[in-house]
Image (cartoon, rainbow, N blue to C red):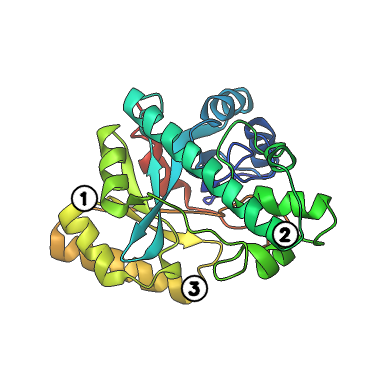
Amino acid sequence: MRKTAKNADLHLHSTASDGGYSPSELMKKCSRAGLDIVALTDHDTVGGIDEARQAGQELGITVIPGIEFSTTYQGKSIHILGYAFDWKDEALQLMLAEQKELRQERLHTMLSKLAALGLSLTPEQVLRYVDGGSVGRPHLAKALIDAGYVGTVAEAFDRYLAEGKPAYVEKSKELSVKEAIDRIHQTDGIAVVAHPLYYDKDEDIKMWVSEWGLDGIEVYHRDHDEEAVTRYLALVNEIEREQKKTLYVTGGSDFHHEEYGRVLEPLGVTRLDTGLAEKVAALQR
């Protein structure tokens, strides 16, 4: 594919969390899509970064180490992306191990709720989809499909796993937004708020920048239409003007799999300008 000015994607997931492809398979798909700069941003794990970077090197793709932290703020779930950090940092590894343990406990609670509804699954039926990383609801949805309880991931969420549904379990002891930003900074990375349209927290984002050091905003995202892009570019400009601080503008597809939940989008449709991605890639040590 001919390279264009938009050949970057800084929001991708692999089987190390809840994606559908291994890190190396994902990089091959990125290569076929004509992407030159990407970031692997699995949920609460860095388990796929080494494999992705090795595959990227072989394919001529720059792979930025990334992560997507699940956090809470005023009772609402907020995702914070980390980029270009030291993913082998010992303190970070310990913290992620604790988060992995909490996800395992949450899985067992959800399985108990499903069993009470007459849907019997073993942990092994779910964990077969987890490639050494963190278990999540999409893995459980796949196990429900295999068992014949539902037909699609979307149906699994709509009937059982989405917030407010009978098998939903709230995450415990999640990081706060500030803790996630601090953790990323402690490992020499930058912190970016993911898909801000999901939260409608523009004024809070301004505070996160001024008081907690948030470094950027994911302006371009699969679920951001032109109106949303205009809105968040304006927010970036406002913050930069008022706070005299340059923000990183990032974006990506948030790709998991072509048929992930309700999302039906092949890799390579949602892209980021190469120049914006190069600013993040330049931070790598």
- Label 2–label 1 contact, CB within 8 A: no
Does dot 2 land on a helix, a strand or a loop? Answer: helix
Residue 278 numbered mark, or none? none
Residue 265 visible, this orientation: no
Local crowd size for mark 2, using a 10 Å CA cut-off: few (<14), some (14–19), many (≥20): many
Residue lying at the far bottom of the rendered structure: 227
Q: Which residue is drawn at 14% across and 57% down?
A: 244
The image shows residue 93 at horizontal and vertical percentages of 40, 28
Q: Mark number for residue 153?
A: 2
- Residue type (three-letter) at the residue carrying disc 2: Val
Q: Is residue 126 left or right of residue 41?
A: right
Which residue position holds label 3? Answer: 226
Q: Which of 122 and 1 is in front in this view?
A: 122
- The residues tagged by marks 2 and 1 sit, at their Cα atoms, a distance apart of 37 Å
- Give x and y (percent) for residue 124: 72, 37
Q: What residue type is labelled 3?
A: Glu
N-term mark: 3 or 1? 1
The answer to which quarter of the image holds residue 133 is top right
Q: In this view, does 258 lie above or below 74?
A: above
The residue shown at (59%, 65%) is: 162
Per the image, the residue denoted by label 1 is 213
- Residue 156: image quadrant is bottom right
Between marks 2 and 1 in the image, the one whose residue lies nearer the viewer: 2
Q: Is mark 1 on a helix, strand or loop?
A: loop
Residue 54 x/y as whole percent = 57, 23
Quadrant for the N terminus in the image: top right
